[in-house]
Image (cartoon, rainbow, N blue to C red):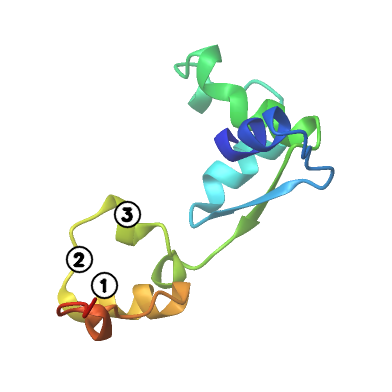
Amino acid sequence: MWLRFVLTDFGEEQVEATPLLCDNTSAIAMSKNPVFHQKTRHINRKYHFIRDAIQDGTIELHYCRTDEQLADMFTKALPKDRFEYLRDALGVKSAKHLEGSIDV
């Protein structure tokens, strides 16, 4: 969402919905159904901005298995092998070859 606003400020408005991956099927179901439920009555209205963005076509919510959730590398402490797997899945490359001095 933030990046959409930045792009709009630069005159590059995004027309298509931004895909948002979620590993929680209950959250996906609640976001797609605007009906009030007993289980959701305690959720403050200000937290429904994702549901509103889905309804207005700004965001498309897609299911993603927990073990494929790339955002985990930014939000959780992970074992080295899990971090490296997610890093590689994002296409991030090692910069070790850039170490050292530069001859002028």
Above or below, 68 relative to 54: below
Say what amino acid the circle numbered 1 marks: Phe
| Residue placed under numbered mark 3 in the picture | 74
Give the amino acid at mark 3.
Answer: Phe
Local packing at callout 3 (Cα closer than 10 Å; few below 14, some 14-19, many 20+) is few
- Which label's residue is closer to the chain start, 1 or 3? 3
Residue wearing tag 2 = 78
Q: Where, by quadrant of the figure, is residue 21 drawn?
A: bottom right
Q: Which label number is shown at residue 40?
A: none
Residue closer to the observer: 35 or 93: 93
Dot 2 crowding, Cα within 10 Å, few <14, some 14–19, many 20+: few
Q: Secondary structure at mark 2?
A: loop
Where does the N terminus fall, quadrant-wise? top right
Q: Are marks 1 and 2 in contact (CB under 8 Å)?
A: yes
Hey, which residue is sitting farthest right in the picture? 15
Q: Between disc 1 and disc 2, whose residue precedes? A: 2
Seen in the picture, residue 12 relative to 53 is either above or below; the reply is below
Q: Residue at left 63%, top 44%?
A: 29
Q: Is residue 21 above or below residue 29?
A: below
Residue 41's x, y, as percent?
51, 17
Residue at image x 40%, y 72%? 67
Q: Is residue 37 left or right of residue 102?
A: right
Q: Is residue 47 left or right of residue 94?
A: right
Where 97 falls versus 26 (above or below)? Answer: below
Task: Residue under label 1, please give it.
Answer: 83
Q: Which quadrant is home to the C terminus? A: bottom left
